[in-house]
């Protein structure tokens, strides 16, 4: 694996990007990362540098980049037309596959991004409950809508349940539509829901919040409390759907919500996401079934287009095969254990958190159960570690290793070597 930097063609592209893109980037990764090609569990940048890829396009490429079966399915569809607006057979088949797989899914509505899916899931809860407020958890990520960008990553967390906007440009009034609770704090959620039950439309949660595991009983308690008051519980499964199990986190943790959102894997690397859930709530999307005032208006130009649908459907077929999840979990377990051992042996205060398909290190030895605990981690140290790893052929996001079915023993071996070397460098 070469790490050469001579005659770097990326420099021109970086300069060009700086001219035409704010901050020189699409907003996701630093401007100096310009990626060209992906195959299996590896990617290459414009300078020809090769990386073991734990970014996986921020999660969709769970079966690996350019999987031959997904590629072939997409290539067969492209000459037949790429989008129609009307129903198509691949989208219908994908909806059926989601209903078969996901415990809460009676019906499905397609959109193009997780942001939209979460936005409409919250709207569906409001339409169903005829109330406005949504409870979310501090640090929970539900895309980029005005509602989702409340207390998603507050630098200075405030008093619960007051929401803090994460972005400029959000109307001030939105703060009053959201209630914020601490993840894993059953007592707080229970008392907030009791106090606000008559104003609450729904509760949205990442069942596995970023890298935070739900403590035993937390999701069950959320289910019980919301059910008691007839408040829809929405699981944001944009990340966990088809990743933690074929039925997602709701299968993995054994708690069924009323609605869920899906994205990333379900589009097989193309722009497709979905809202799925209980038929009586999903009925609000049906103009014919609803009175005018109950109808939830939602259309989208590229929704459920045949290319994204066949890519998603083929990805699901691959994931259904025996051994698919066992393989990813085995790879993830090996990686998590090795990283933990290497850091401990070197004497770092560090905790590897997450589940085998998705994990990272937080540089603290304090227990981590909610967003505020994650702030105790040494961020500068993580940034340096990530940078050293990138120089050693490991590509990852700021705070996540996404594991793929396509990661091989050679990828694991390279990663362990890079970790050991970067840790040695950090100690020096
Ligand atoms: C849990 C979760 N929800 C929603 C989203 C938003 O999805 P998208 O980037 O497709 O809008 C993301 C994106 O990473 C996510 O992680």
Image (cartoon, grey):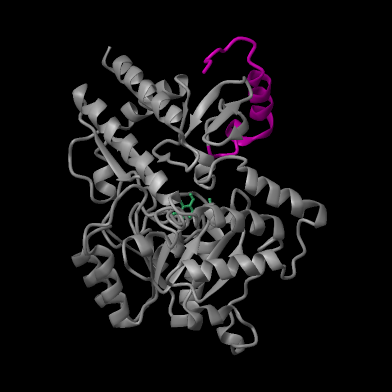
- 69 left or right of 366 in image: right
Total number of numbered labels?
Answer: 0
Q: Is residue 22 above or below residue 139?
A: above
Residue 68 colored in magenta in the image:
no
Residue 421: percent from the left, percent from the top?
A: 34, 17
Q: Residue at x 44, y 75 (%)?
A: 132
- 234 left or right of 369 in image: right
Q: Residue at x 62, y 75 (%)?
A: 297
Q: Is residue 404 above or below residue 147?
A: above
Magenta region, residue range? 1-28
- Tell me which corner region of the image, top left, top right, bottom left or bottom right, holds residue 82: bottom right
Q: Residue at x 76, y 59 (%)?
A: 83
Residue 388: percent from the left, percent from the top?
A: 40, 21
- Tell me which corner region of the image, top left, top right, bottom left or bottom right, holds residue 225: bottom left
The image quadrant where one finds the C terminus is: top left
Residue 290: percent from the left, percent from the top?
A: 59, 87
Q: Give 19 or 389, whichever is nearer the viewer.
A: 389
Q: Give 417 or 398, whichever is nearer the viewer.
A: 417
Residue 409: percent from the left, percent from the top?
A: 42, 31
Q: Going by the picture, which residue comes out furthest to the front? A: 322
Residue 4 colored in magenta in the image:
yes
Visible residue check, residue 308:
yes
Q: Residue at x 72, y 70 (%)?
A: 87
Q: Going by the picture, which residue comes out furthest to the top? A: 6
- Tell me which corner region of the image, top left, top right, bottom left or bottom right, holds residue 374: top left
Visible residue check, residue 109:
no
């Amino acid at each position: 694996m070469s790490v050469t930097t001579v005659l770097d063609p990326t420099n021109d592209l970086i300069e060009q990007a700086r001219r035409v893109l704010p901050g020189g980037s699409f907003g996701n990764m630093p401007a100096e990362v310009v990626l060209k090609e992906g195959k299996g569990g590896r990617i290459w940048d414009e300078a020809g540098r090769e990386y073991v890829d734990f970014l996986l396009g921020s999660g969709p490429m769970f079966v690996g980049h350019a999987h031959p079966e997904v590629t072939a399915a997409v290539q067969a569809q492209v000459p037949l037309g790429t989008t129609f607006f009307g129903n198509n057979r691949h989208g219908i088949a994908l909806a059926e596959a989601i209903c078969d797989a996901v415990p809460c899914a009676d019906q499905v509505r397609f959109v193009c991004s997780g942001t939209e899916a979460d936005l409409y899931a919250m709207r569906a809860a409001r339409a169903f409950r005829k109330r406005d407020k949504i409870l979310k958890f501090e640090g929970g990520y539900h895309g980029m809508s005005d509602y989702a960008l409340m207390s998603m990553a507050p630098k200075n967390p405030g008093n619960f349940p007051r929401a803090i906007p994460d972005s400029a440009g959000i109307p001030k009034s939105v703060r009053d539509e959201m209630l914020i609770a601490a993840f894993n704090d059953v007592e707080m959620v229970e008392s907030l829901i009791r106090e606000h039950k008559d104003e609450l439309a729904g509760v949205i949660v990442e069942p596995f919040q970023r890298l935070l595991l739900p403590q035993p009983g937390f999701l069950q308690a959320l289910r019980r409390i919301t059910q008691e008051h007839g408040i829809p519980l929405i699981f944001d499964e944009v990340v966990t759907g088809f990743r933690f199990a074929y039925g997602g986190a709701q299968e993995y943790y054994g708690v069924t919500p009323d609605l869920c959102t899906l994205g990333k894997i379900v589009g097989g690397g193309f722009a497709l996401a979905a809202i799925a859930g209980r038929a009586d709530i999903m009925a609000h999307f049906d103009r014919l079934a609803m009175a005018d005032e109950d109808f939830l208006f939602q259309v989208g130009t590229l929704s459920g287009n045949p290319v994204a649908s066949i890519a998603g459907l083929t990805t699901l077929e691959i994931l259904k095969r025996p051994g698919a999840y066992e393989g990813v979990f085995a790879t993830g377990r090996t990686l998590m254990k090795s990283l933990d051992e290497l850091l401990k042996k070197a004497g770092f205060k560090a905790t590897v958190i997450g589940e085998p398909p998705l994990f990272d290190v937080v540089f603290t030895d304090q227990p981590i159960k909610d967003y505020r605990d994650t702030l105790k981690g040494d961020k500068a140290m993580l940034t340096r570690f990530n940078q050293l790893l990138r120089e050693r052929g490991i590509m990852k996001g700021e705070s996540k290793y996404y594991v793929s079915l396509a990661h091989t023993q050679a990828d694991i071996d390279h990663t362990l070597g890079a970790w050991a070397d970067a840790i040695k460098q950090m100690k020096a």
